[in-house]
Image (cartoon, rainbow, N blue to C red):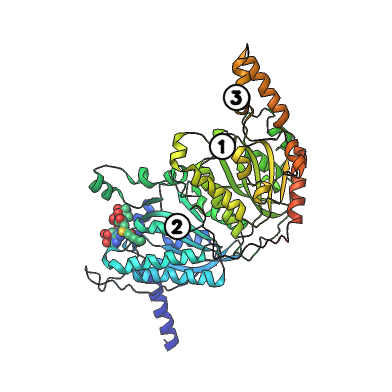
Amino acid sequence: MSLLSRKISELQERTAKAVQGGGASAIAKQIAMGKLPARERINQLLDPGSFYEYDLFIEHEARGFGMEGKDLAGDGVVIGTGTINGKPVAIYAQDFTVAGGSLGMMHARKITKIMDYALRMRIPLIGINDSGGARIQEGVNSLAGYGEIFFRNTMASGVIPQLSVILGPCAGGAVYSPALTDYVFVVDKISKMFITGPEVIKSVLGEEIDMEALGGARVHSEITGNAHFFANSEAECFTQIKTLLDYIPAHNEARCEKGKVAEPDKKFKIDKIVPVDPTKPYDVRDVIRAVTDSSEFFEVQEMWAANIVIGYGRINGRTVGFVANQPLVLAGVLDCDSSDKAARFIRYCDAFEIPIVTLEDMPGYLPGVDQEHAGVIRHGAKLLYAYSEATVPKVTVILRKAYGGGYIAMNSRHLRADFVFAWPTAEIAVMGPEGAANIIFRKEIMEAEDPDAMRKQKVEEYKQKFANPYVAAAKGYIDSVIEPVDTRKFLIHSLEVSLNKEVKRPKKKHGIPPF
Ligand code: HXC
């Protein structure tokens, strides 16, 4: 055997050993839990044969607790680059079969190396999390590793897309990396995210709670809003990632490529979706599908704060971010969670130069002590801030109700919408006709022989006067009153004329948004 052949077989032997991760029995345990091994995950997500792995032969530096000489293959994390839909990405996947995917110093160094590559090459970063958290035996070195990751997450924020995929436990401080990234993907029964686990809760609070109820995929998709995409299997989750990456640009100075233009599906009849009666609900996603290419809409955070709908579609071949009140849920009111949800999405679209289309139909902010005490003033302000700050093309269509603070907040002209269109069914007023009539005609109603009849008459008078788009149109607050069937046409044109939009803002280090 030649020297070169010997060297090559040594490399092959070392590689074959390193890619075994925690060994056959740990891998079997992983699979029995319904989870794929780390490299298998990467290979399923990336284009076939496109993955190149780095730092395969990294060795851990844990000392004490019997760690010396322990073989932790690749220190429990796989890193590399490859392509998805033909476009480059950087990726890391924690390997739970090696010391529970726990994060030691060298493990963290591998992750930060691939994060640095992603930022330098300006390509999306995908992190697959499956870990018991800070490697307890490595003490402060593992904490330092997390700090280095969090710092890089923050530096990369708004420059490259950062996607976190939770495919196992993500425990303790480890949760803050996903929380700092743009999109969090979870899988039913597999993802578990929590700061303090069941053991700690039991010892401190004496309460028994299982991991699923504490921080399972549904909890983060429906209650906390930490997750953006919920899937029933790892395969479904990978499809969601591919779809998202198809909509968004690779970095903040790239533009989404113009794709094939396709008309919406004729089954979405835009003039039949929205009932004229403002008290009747409908699914605003049907309106979105009536204006997007091929009627495709990729919803974000579908299961949380469903009174507002956010997500991506394409209009005339280009990606657009939609923000739409959802009359199906709580009449589409704005509240703490829906304001947070929309505000963050708007900031994402703005950072990555994705135009925003807002569809408005809501009766205002949700009243009540609960909301006031939950901080609806602070949370609601985030929405005003996000729309005001955004310099991407911003188009609003008022479908029906645009009352009070909600009228201003939902990308009004006053927050610098570029185009505001209203359907003839739009009602733009300080508040709903019933409430308004009760306040301004209170004396007449009280003193009337038949107060109910008088109330009805006054409500009707108010509606005639204010519950229409023409008062706002007369002041130029809306640009055009349009027929519903012309909505796509107006959207295409307004987005096309905004392609070279440029806005100058006062010089500052950064604003102080109501975080
Ligand atoms: C070292 C760990 C580990 C950890 C798991 N392991 N977590 N090793 N440090 N944090 C090891 C286990 O010892 C075990 O090793 C192997 O990984 C598999 O773990 P199991 O417990 O057998 O698996 P499972 O029953 O599936 O339970 C998974 C788990 C549990 C729920 C994640 O391991 C767990 O609760 N781990 C601790 C989670 C936690 O509280 N982490 C927070 C750390 S503090 P062997 O050799 O037996 O196979 C923290 C603060 C960071 O993260 C702050 C940053 C700002």
- Closer-to-camera residue (252/136): 252
Find disc 2 in the rendering and name its residue.
178
- Closer-to-camera residue (134/336): 336
Distance of label 3 from label 2 (alpha carbons): 48 Å
Q: Residue 343 in the image: x percent, y percent?
A: 55, 50
Q: Within the image, what quadrant is residue 17 found in?
A: bottom left
Q: Within the image, what quadrant is residue 390 found in?
A: bottom right
Helix, strand or loop at mark 3: helix
Q: Callout 3, which amino acid?
A: Asn
Q: Is residue 269 visible?
A: no
Picture residue at 65% right of the left edge, 17% below the top: 454
Distance of label 3 from label 1 (alpha carbons): 21 Å
Picture residue at 57% right of the left edge, 69% below the top: 122
Find disc 1 in the rendering and name its residue.
333
Q: Is residue 177 visible?
A: yes
The mark closer to the camera, 2 or 1, is: 1
